[in-house]
Image (tube, rainbow, N blue to C red):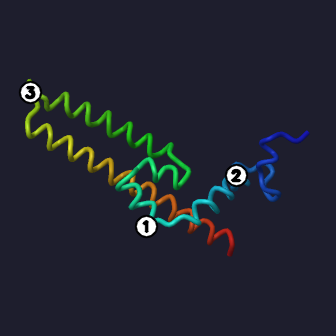
Amino acid sequence: MTTEFNQNQTPNSPWNPFLPTKRDISRTEELAQKSPIVAGVLTFFLPLAAMIYLNRGVNNLKIFGYVFVTAFIVGIVSYEGKASRKTEGIGNLVGLCGQVAIITENVKAVTLARKRLASQQS
């Protein structure tokens, strides 16, 4: 009785959820081949292109969502009947923080994949 879940497990870990699956290992190998510098630069200029380059976007989309909600809430709280320079500055700061978070997420994903691959091979 072989299920899809069991086929995804490595031969050494047919039931242990704490050991990497074949999918985890292939994903690590794929990310480890990418360049963290290219991922960071692409994310800075074209976040969508970076998501395609890394073949992952869920975390980036979550960060976009959090930034949007935060900017919306801050905009409502600081709005004084008309858009002021204060509101614009706060919006720019929230956007910058979101951009830094996305760049960090993508660079960290590639760097950690390289470390995992090196530790798996040794």
Q: Residue at x 70, y 55 (%)?
A: 19
- In this view, the residue farthest toward the right is 1
Residue 71 in which image quadrant: top left
Residue 34 lies, with reference to residue 102, above or below; the image says below
Of 48 and 100, the residue lying toward us: 48
Q: Residue at x 40, y 43 (%)?
A: 63
Amino acid at circle 3? Lys
Q: Are marks 2 and 1 in contact (CB under 8 Å)?
A: no
The picture quadrant where one finds residue 114 is bottom right
Residue 44 quadrant: bottom left
Secondary structure at badge 2 equals helix
In this rendered view, identify the residue nearer to me: 59 or 116: 59
* Left or right: 88 in relation to 12: left
* Mark earlier in primary sequence (3, 1): 1
Q: Position of residue 18 (x, y in %)?
A: 67, 52
Q: Residues within 10 Å of mark 3 (few under 14, many from 20)?
A: few
Mark 3 to mark 2 CA distance (whole Å): 51 Å
**Tag 2 or tag 3, which sits nearer the N-term?**
2
Q: Secondary structure at mark 3?
A: loop
Which residue is disc 2 drawn over?
23
Q: Which residue is mark 1?
A: 37
Q: Which residue is mark 3?
A: 82
- Residue 102 position in % (x across, y down): 39, 51
Q: Is residue 92 left or right of residue 46?
A: left
Q: Which mark is residue 67?
A: none
Nearer the observer: mark 2 or 1; the answer is 1
The quadrant in which the C terminus is found is bottom right
Residue extending furthest toward the top: 81
Give the residue displayed 45% in from the left and 56% down from the top: 106
